[in-house]
Image (cartoon, rainbow, N blue to C red):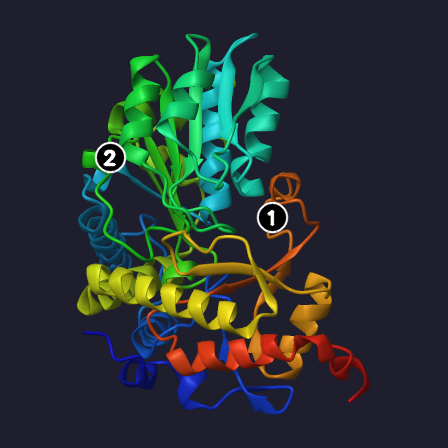
Amino acid sequence: MIDPLLIRKDFPMYRDHVEMQGKPLIWLDNASTTFKPDCVIEAIERYYKKETSNSHRGDYDLCYQMDQEVMKTRKAVANLIHCKPEEVVFTSGTTEGVNLISFGWAMEHLKKGDEILLNEAEHASNVLPWYKAAKVTGAVVKFVPLTEEGRVSVENLKAAISNKTKIVACAHVTNVLGYIAPIKELAKVAHEHGAIFVMDGAQSVPHMKIDVKDLDVDFLVFSGHKMCGPTGIGVLYGKYSRLEETQPYMSGGGMNDKFNMCGEATFLEPPARFEAGTQHLAGIIGLRAAIEYLQSIGLEEINKYEEELKAYAVKKLEETGNAIIYNAKSEAGIVTFNIKDVFAQDGATYLNSRGIACRSGQHCAKILNDFLKTPATIRASFYFYTTKDDIDALADAVKNGGNYLDAFFN
């Protein structure tokens, strides 16, 4: 059973009593980024203080040790998502991962008239790279309609997909509404039509157990900083056969086999061919520390606790009589709402005056505004160190949210 107060002892951001607007910080923006525990900070610090070296660039002990550290992290990721280490590519984050697939796979395989299927709830990082691929190849981006509730459904995908569809890209958990998509079933439909399936796991890998073999996705992308790891490090998983079909979109040292003055070049096998230049080695080491930390707590326990927090938050916000909730029935630890008669960013500024950090605006999902019929929303997102007291403070602030001008004049 998760005890958030005990867990907070592992996090300097809590131990050091960080304040905002002169009040104890209440952090409810975990869908954006997460706090880092001591073990992650210490792992990064150890690299810079005692283990600094490049990887695959020398024949001395420190370099060899760094080679081993990189491989250990590759194996840790493979263990986390149930794949082979050679199917793990290090990136700067989810955004780079999708771009790598778009430039390296889509632009190599799409032709004029082919279709890419997305949906209205997708984050910009899982929309804009596909627009680019479509523009270059002549393919067409289409959108699978959401259900009335805001979910991606198997039925709607079946109605939208065709034999022209070559790519279906979908977030496992959407970053605004927090619905968990039926990925395994969606991937099955995509494969039945000869399409590949790309899963954005930015909001799911940090919160629940993931088995890419069982889900049968072709590609998966996620970021380290959303799972207690460092910024600037992420993962692209690809079925090895898909990685072999993918061209690198960055070239340089460490990813080539050989090149000559005639302009001829050959590349190494995956995953090395996608990791040009010096990698974010401190980030790779920190990522492994974060994975081991989450596994020590238990991803099933984390998921269960967040579901409990979500239900509690919906109940408390509904009790205020002053909240418009857009995703009361979604499963993930995300509550998207507005304070009645208050513009979202004014509401978030008011919450800030109470020491509460929530995100406001369009949350990089700008197509979704038409579906929600509102220009902006406030998003509160939880993690395993969030307490019910945090949610009580949020609800109390929302209850009095009509006084948002206090944030500007006090």
Q: Residues within 10 Å of mark 1 (few under 14, many from 20)?
A: some
In x, y percent, where is residue 339?
64, 66
SS for callout 1: loop
Residue at position x 33%, y 79% from top?
38
Q: Which is nearer the eye, 26 or 41?
A: 26
Residue placed under numbered mark 2 in the picture: 215
For marks 1 and 2 on the same chain, the one whose residue lies earlier in the sequence = 2
Q: Which is nearer the eye, 26 or 58?
A: 26
Q: Residues within 10 Å of mark 2 (few under 14, many from 20)?
A: some
In three-dimensional space, the C-alpha distance between marks 1 and 2, rounded to whole angstroms, equals: 26 Å
Residue placed under numbered mark 1 in the picture: 364
Mark 2 residue type: Leu
Position of 303 with respect to 399 (left or right) is: left
Q: Residue furthest right?
A: 409
Residue at position x 63%, y 57% from top?
377
The image quadrant of residue 383 is: bottom left
In x, y percent, where is residue 286?
34, 64
Mark 1 residue type: Cys
Position of 391 relative to 363 (above/below): below
In the picture, the quarter occupied by the C terminus is: bottom right
In x, y percent, where is residue 25?
53, 83
SS for callout 2: helix
Q: Is residue 246 visible?
A: no
Marks 1 and 2 in Cβ contact (< 8 Å): no
Q: Which is nearer the eye, 218 or 298?
A: 298
Q: Is residue 355 visible?
A: yes
Position of 138 relative to 15 (above/below): above
